[in-house]
Image (cartoon, rainbow, N blue to C red):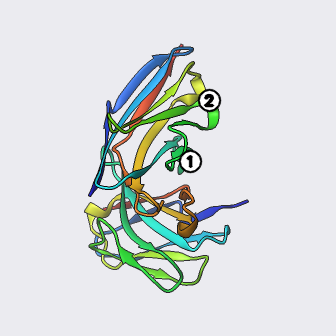
Amino acid sequence: NAGVTQTPKFQVLKTGQSMTLQCAQDMNHNSMYWYRQDPGMGLRLIYYSASEGTTDKGEVPNGYNVSRLNKREFSLRLESAAPSQTSVYFCASNNRDRNQPQHFGDGTRLSIL
Amino acid sequence: AQSVTQLGSHVSVSEGALVLLRCNYSSSVPPYLFWYVQYPNQGLQLLLKYTSAATLVKGINGFEAEFKKSETSFHLTKPSAHMSDAAEYFCAVSPWGTASKLTFGTGTRLQVTL
């Protein structure tokens, strides 16, 4: 089982460039999430999608947009990348209405110069 | 509002020794609680979860945690550390009834020495 797949795994951008991080899950989950992980700060929720067709802001949404393309896919877009967005980004999914724990992808390591 | 505090950003134990990783939570409603493990360059993997059933929860790889409401704690333990346990461990909390709005602690890096 692939679980949650994130692409790309690594990316280097210049300040001001745009970028879309892709996430796909094959577990038929209805909810999907984007987090960022920074040293000493744990994971912080950027955006989430409770179900297909809905998205909501998390704790740190500024500078990001998301698209729930279909039930399987949830993308995160940086329109104008800034050095403060250098981080490791994780996508997760679960069936929220069944109180299942979240399953995580392996992450995208993004550096912005 | 909910929050999680993990005491000790780094913990070092000898192989075969007891592992104790501390987690205290704050929540205005009864919580769900989780421990995740992260190995280098990987995502987070669920170790165990508390969702208001038994207060002593057993997880994978020999880990367990006890929910103590009076102490607002959910400490993670393992009787005998193995080299393969070296990783970063995250405690997380969500409101009771949903595993969606997770709030994570800042993590504890476990080092296991010979």
Q: Position of residue B18 (x, y in %)?
A: 50, 18
Q: SS at mark 2?
A: helix
Chain label for disc 1? B
- What is the quadrant of residue B78 in the picture? top right
Q: Earlier in the sequence, mark 2 or mark 1?
A: 1
Seen as rendered, the residue at the extreme right is A1
Identify residue for label 1: B45
Q: From the viewer's perspective, is B27 left or right of A1?
A: left
Give amino acid for label 1: Gln
Up the image or down, B33 lies above or below A63; here it is above
Q: Which mark is residue B62?
A: 2
Q: Position of residue B88 (x, y in %)?
A: 45, 38
Task: Mark 2 vs mark 1: give the one in front.
Answer: 2
Q: From the viewer's perspective, is B91 left or right of B15?
A: left
Residue drawn at x 30%, y 65% as measured from the top left? A59
Nearer-the-camera pick, A59 or A80: A59
Q: Position of residue B9 (x, y in %)?
A: 33, 33
Q: Residues within 10 Å of mark 1 (few under 14, many from 20)?
A: some
